[in-house]
Amino acid sequence: MELCADNRHANLYSMAHGGVLTTMADTAMGAKCLALNKKVVTISLTIEFMHAVMTNTPRVFTEATVLHDGRQTMVCECKILDAKGKLYAKANATFFVIGKLLDD
């Protein structure tokens, strides 16, 4: 996923609202689980913000990784970066597996 932050995503300080970045991370990690044929719902999610994503930041994108692929739960990590590799935020989440996307 990627985002070019503009005023629609901004808080009062002309930076992307933390909720927008959290939603990006949650969606990217959920998609990573779907790629492994698992339908999931979020149990818990934490995010740490290292730098503000200002509305003039060209583009940030997500990089999600599955850390644990279990039958009932999955654990993922997601970084929000720019094209130069600058880390803006890092999220970790635990997901509950509600089923398979496609039957085997």
Image: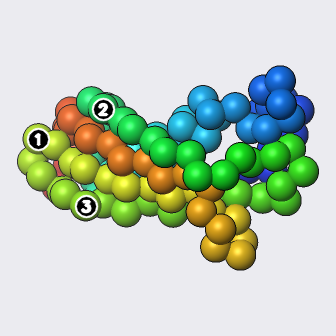
Q: From the viewer's perspective, is 94 left or right of 51?
A: left
Q: How is the image coloured?
A: rainbow
Disc 3, SS: strand
Disc 2, SS: strand
Q: CA distance from mark 1 to mark 2?
A: 14 Å
Check if mark 3's residue and mark 2's residue have beta carbons within 8 Å: no
Viewer-nearest of discs 1 and 2: 2
Q: Which image quadrant is residue 9 in?
A: top right
Q: Which mark is residue 41?
A: none
Residue beneath the point at 81% across and 46% down = 54
| Quadrant of the image containing the C terminus | bottom left
Q: CA distance from mark 1 to mark 3?
A: 14 Å
User: Badge 2: how crowded within 10 Å, few (<14), some, or many (20+)?
Assistant: few
* N-terminal label among 1 and 3: 3
Q: Which mark is residue 67?
A: 3
Foreground: 61 or 99?
A: 61
Residue beneath the point at 26% across and 39% down = 95
In the rendered image, residue 18, in percent from the top left (x then y), is placed at 62, 34
Q: Amino acid at mark 3?
A: Leu
Q: Which mark is residue 44?
A: 2
Residue beneath the point at 11% across and 41% down = 72
Q: Which image quadrant is residue 61 in?
A: bottom right
Q: Evaluate whether residue 28 shows in this view.
A: no
User: Badge 3: how crowded within 10 Å, few (<14), some, or many (20+)?
Assistant: few
* N-terminal label among 3 and 2: 2
Q: From the viewer's perspective, is 74 left or right of 58?
A: left
Residue with the mark numbered 1:
72
